[in-house]
Amino acid sequence: MKKIDEKYFLNDKEKTSLTIEDCLTKDEQILWKGKPKKSAFILNEFFKMFPIALIWLLIDSGIIAVLIINEAFNQMPVFAIIFIVVFFAIHLIPVWFWISNIVTANKRHKNIEYVFTNERILIKSGLVGIDLKTIYYSEIQFVNLKVGIIDKMLKVGDIYITASFHSAILYDIEDPYNISTKLQKIVNDIKTDIEYPNELRPAENYGYKTQLKNINLKNNNDEEK
């Protein structure tokens, strides 16, 4: 049996890391490219689970403190002490998750990239490996914007994309109102172009096949602020 070439689907260059540009088709063009604002992303990661982690930590710390003050450990057999230590180590999992999110925030931010092309949305993310999610404009049902208190202070926002089979969130986007409005226009233009009856189409269509002439998005230079 002929051996399968495991590199058949790779580009000619032997890539060690995945970039958005590697995944574009021949005629695909980038309309907008960006990533979360670093300061906002890391700060939001800190506060994301902070209330739960703090309450969990205070409760468990209080129980442990009571056991120590009452010298309960001195009266317990070794296996009981081991059981208590293991129990609290497992019970504090929300705290470990919170700490892990903070520690890995910088690395995850480095791997995140959002791209709007004339055909689809590409979302790159990951910590150790790289995940690449594709959402076609025709699948998108809703585009919503959420701006929290911290987001408002740092002039960013989260764009929520709901599609037919999956959803995605573009975190901590700068100029969020403009980007979300332009994204909604792209979705509307492309859906109109796809669904509009062929016999009623005008001689020149300003939608999908003409590369969205009316769309003007500025590129994000990925500068860390």
Image (cartoon, grey):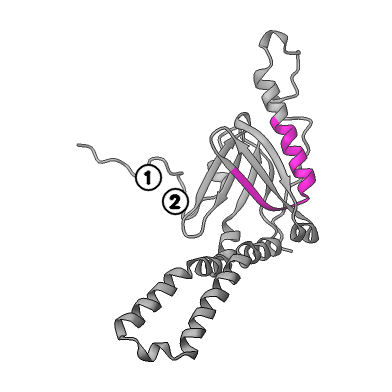
> Quick check: can you spot residue 26?
yes
Precedes in sequence: disc 1 or disc 2: 1
Residue at the image position 77 percent from the left and 61 percent from the top: 154
Left or right: residue 203 compared with residue 49? right
> Relative to the observer, which residue lies in front, 46 or 203?
46
The dot on residue 7 is 1
> Relative to the observer, which residue lies in front, 131 or 220?
131
> Relative to the observer, which residue lies in front, 37 or 19?
37
> Quick check: can you spot residue 118?
no
| SS of the residue under disc 2 | loop
The reply to whether the magenta stretch includes residue 176 is: yes
Which amino acid, by three-letter code, is at mark 2?
Glu
Cβ atoms at labels 1 and 2 below 8 Å apart: yes
State which quadrant residue 82 falls in: bottom left
Q: How many marks?
A: 2
Which amino acid, by three-letter code, is at mark 1?
Lys
Q: What segment is highlighted magenta in the picture?
A: 168-187
Instruction: Identify whether 134 is placed above or below 198.
Output: below
Residue at the image position 57 percent from the left and 34 percent from the top: 26
Which x, y percent locates residue 163?
A: 60, 35
| SS of the residue under disc 1 | loop
Instruction: Identify whether 139 is placed above or below 82.
Output: above
> Relative to the observer, which residue lies in front, 108 or 83?
83
Q: Which residue, given by chain and number where applicable, does mark 2 sit on?
A: 14
Which x, y percent locates residue 149?
A: 77, 59
Q: Quick one: quadrant of the N terminus?
A: top left
Q: Main secondary structure of the magenta part?
A: helix
The reply to whether the magenta stretch includes residue 45 is: no
Which x, y percent locates residue 96?
A: 50, 69
